[in-house]
Amino acid sequence: MTQAANEGSRQGDEGAAGDTLDTFPKLLLHQARTRPTRPAVREKDYGIWQAWTWAEQADEIRALACGLAALGMKRGDRIAIVGDNRPRLYWTMTAAQAIGGVPVPVYQDSVTDEMAFVLEHAEVRFAVCEDQEQVDKLLEIRERHPGIEAVIFDDARGLRHYKMDWLHDFESVQENGRAFDRENPDFYEAEIAKAHGDDTAIMLYTSGTTGNPKGVVLTFDNLIKSAEAGIEFEGLREDEEVLAYLPMAWVGDHLFSFAQSYVAGFCVSCPESASTVLQDLRELGPTYFFAPPRIFENILTTVMVRMEDAGALKRRMFHFFMNVARRSGTRILDGKPVSTMDRILYAIGKVLVYGPLKNTLGFSNVRVGYTAGEAIGPDIFEFYRALGINLKQLYGSTEASVFITIQPNGDIRSDSVGRAAPGVELKIDEDTGEVLFRGPGVFREYYKSPKDTQDTKTEGGWVRTGDAGVITEDGHLKIIDRAKDVGHLDDGSLFAPKFLENKLKFFPFIKEAVAFGHKRPHVSAFVNIDLEAVGSWAERNGIPYGSYRELAARPEVYEVIKGNVEQVNRDLAADPRLCKSQIHRFLILHKELDADDGELTRTRKVRRPVVAERYGELIDALYGDGETGHIETEFTYEDGSKGHIQADLRIERAETFAAEAAPDLKMAS
C-alpha cells in the first residue's frame, strides 16, 4: 500500500468508528474489514506458531478494551505494559487507545527501581504484565506507589496462590469485557470515534544515558505519518514478514512492529523466547528486518567463532569468497559495474558460502534491513551488504518517531546515515555542529518536563538531536559522535570516542569498549571481552580459565586484544581527522559492563558519567606510569542481590603509527 493510497484511505474511508483513519484503533477496524482473513500477528508457543487474523485480532482487542473500561479505566489514564514481545501486550496498546488510554511500555529487564521511576513519573493507574516475574516487581512497586489500581497478567504460571483483589487474569478481563460489550453495544466504537490524529498515542521513555529517562509524548499523527513515509519509501506491502523481538519500550519496535503493521496490513510474529530468537528467525525468514548494531555484531561474532572451529578447507574457502564479496558484493547489490571474473566468482560464492550462510542466519528473504540506535562499525556494515543483504543505516530518535534520515537504494555509504527521510528537514547548528531536524514525526513534549521540552525544541519547530554531524554537498548526513561526547585532546586534535569504540567492537573478541581522551595527552580505553568468542578460542588453544575475570586477565588474551587495538591504530593513522586519536594504553575490565549495575542503558548504550565515576581510579592509572590499576567495585547478581569484587588489572601499551598532520577542524569543544 503506497503513501498516496494510505492518505486516500485515511481521508476517504468512513469506517464503523465514523471517522477518518487517523488513529490505530480506526486502522484496526479498517484492516479487519478489508483483509479479515489475512494473518495479523503470530506467536510461537511450545514450538508451534499460532496465528490470529486481522478479524480475530480485532475481536480480541475489543474484548480487552471493554474489559479495561469495566475495571474503571478512563480517557487519559496511563497503562504500563511490561514483558517480552507478546500478541496480548501489543493488543493492550490498541485496546487502551480505543477507550482513550495512553500505553506506557516499560523495558522488561528493568530492575524494580528503574521500573518504579517510570510508573510513578507517568502516574500509571493500570498495568499489564507478561508473567510472574513482572508481577512480583509490580507487587513491590505498588507498596510505595499505591496509585496502581489494577494489574493484569498474561501467563498464569506461578500465580495460582496470588489472591489480591487488584490482580486479574487476562482472559477473565476479556470475559468481563465481552459481558460489558453486550450490555453497552455502542460503547466501543463510540469511544474510538472520539479520538483524532493529534491526540496522544503513546508515551515512550528515553534510555537515560545521562540521568533519569524522559517520557516522550507521541501523537497518532506523529506515528502514522512516519509509518506511511517509511512504507512509501521502501515499497512495503501487506505480505511482509516481520519478527518482533526488540523491547516493546523502544521506539524502533513500536514503529516497525506496530505502527507500520497497522498501516500496511502486514503480519508481525513474536518469538517463543529471547533464547530462541535466532532459531525463530530462521524458521520465519523475514522480508523486513530491523536490529541495532549490537545484534549484527553478535551474529558476526557467532559466524567467526564457528568458522574458526571449522576444518581448514572450509575456512580457506570461506575467507577466499568473503574477500571476493568485500571486493564486489556491495557493488553488485547497488547495481554498479563489476568485472566479469568477479561476477563469476561471486556467483560461485553465492552457492557455496553466501547463500548457505544467509539461510543459516535467517536472512535469505530479507528485502530491506535496517540498523540504527547507535553507529555501526563500517566493517560490520560492509560484511552484511557484501553477502547481498540490503542492509541500510537509518538515523532516528524517539523524539522523531524514528525517522530522521534513511539511506536510499543505490546510494548507500558506510560513513553516512543517508539523506533526510521523506518530509524531514535537516540543518547543522553553525556554532556547535549539532544536527537539528523538523518533520511530521516531531514529538509533542517531554511529559511533565517543560524545561527539557523547551531546551530540545527550538523556535520554528527544529529539534536538537544532541549529535554532532556534517551534511555533504549531496545531502548525506554523517554523524561524528554525540555532541556532548565529542572533544579534543589537549593539543586540540579531534576526539570522537564512539567512532573509536565501534572500530574496536568490529573484532569478535571485543564486546564493549569505552574510550577516554578529552583534554588528555592521548587516548586510552577500557575493553570488555566477548566471553563466548574468547572462551571458544581459549578452549581450542588449551588455555584454562574458570570465570570471565580469569579469562580477561590471561596474558594470551591481552596479546590478542593488543593486536586488535594496534590494527585500529593503523586504520586511524590513515584518517587525517582522527590520526591523533590512536589508542596508547588499554586494559581489559575484570567484569562485563552491565545495565543492572547502571553502567549501560537498557538499550545497551554506555552511561559514560557512571563509568567515569565508578572506574575513576582505573582511568587515572591509564594516564599514569604504572603497569597495573587497582579497583574495587559493586556488582548485581541475577537475583538482585549485591556483591563486591576487587582486582589489580594489567595495563598494556599499544603501538602507535606515524600519520599525516590532522587538518584544522572547526568543531566546538
Image (cartoon, grey):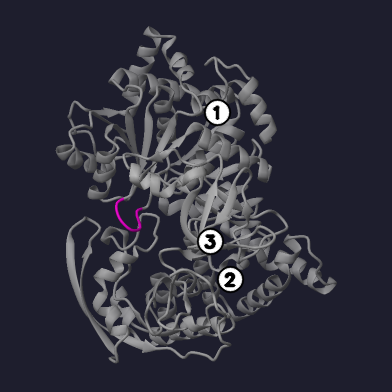
Q: Which residues are magenta?
A: 208-212
- Whole-percent x and y of residue 63? 41, 20
User: For the residue marked with disc 2, what is the amino acid?
Assistant: Asp
Quarter of the view holding residue 343: bottom right
Q: Return the residue nearer the eye: 551 or 471.
A: 471
- State the separation of the CA atoms marked 3 and 2: 31 Å
Q: Is residue 22 magenta?
A: no
Q: Which residue is mark 2?
A: 379
Q: Which residue is mark 3?
A: 430
Compared across the picture, whether 515 is left or right of 118 comes to: right
Residue 53 numbered mark, or none: 1
**First in residue order: circle 3 vs circle 1:** 1
Q: Nearer the viewer, mark 3 or mark 1?
A: 3
- Whole-percent x and y of residue 230? 61, 43
Whether 159 is drawn above or below 475: the answer is: above
Q: Overall secondary structure of the magenta stretch?
A: loop
Q: Is residue 210 magenta?
A: yes
Mark 1 burial class by Cα count in 10 Å: few <14, some 14-19, many 20+: some
